[in-house]
Amino acid sequence: MAVMTKANEHELPSNFELEKSVQLFKAFGDQTRYKILFLLADKSLSVNEIAEEIGISQSATSHQLKLLRQTELVRGIRAGQKINYQLSDQHIITIFEQVREHVRERDPYHRS
């Protein structure tokens, strides 16, 4: 995705960019999926490990991972009989950091 500059700040994104961007925001818009992405920022994990960490069923975790794979936010890496999931790329971590910074700036109870 291109960085906004003065020259293109009023140029609307292409239809492809709009569609993909909205899909990403929808994926981020669910607390369970957000937790999964946050967990995968540090390490790759199996479905069972993710389910245990966030306290939901393996079936519900698999469903959320399917949605995250469809938006290309995570990918599965086969490790023998099991599949470990990891973030697709480092951009996701950057998005998390930017969102967290934005939220903390507005949190009256957060102390830096």
Image (spheres, helix red, strand yellow):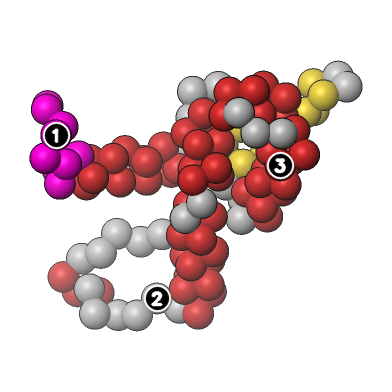
Cα–Cα span, label 3 and label 2 = 34 Å
Q: Residue 60 has which mark?
A: 3
Q: Is residue 2 above or below residue 58?
A: below
Residue 77 shows in the view: no
Q: Amino acid at mark 3?
A: Ala
Q: Which residue is mark 2?
A: 13
Element at badge 3? helix
Residue at image point 66% right, 29% down: 51
Mark 3 vs mark 2: in front = 3
Q: Amino acid at mark 2?
A: Pro
Q: Residue 31 has which mark?
A: none
User: Disc count in the image?
Assistant: 3
- Chief secondary structure of the magenta portion: loop
Q: Amino acid at mark 1?
A: Tyr
Q: Horizontally, is 72 left or right of 15 in the view?
A: right
Element at badge 1? loop
> What is the span of residues highlighted in magenta in the rendered image?
104-112
Mark 2 vs mark 1: in front = 1
Q: Horizontally, is 8 left or right of 62 in the view?
A: left
Q: Which residue is mark 1?
A: 109
* Farthest right residue in view: 81
Q: Nearer the viewer, residue 96 or 107?
A: 107
Cα–Cα span, label 2 and label 1 = 36 Å
Q: Residues within 10 Å of mark 3 (few under 14, many from 20)?
A: few
Residue 6 shows in the view: yes
Image quadrant occupied by the N terminus: bottom left
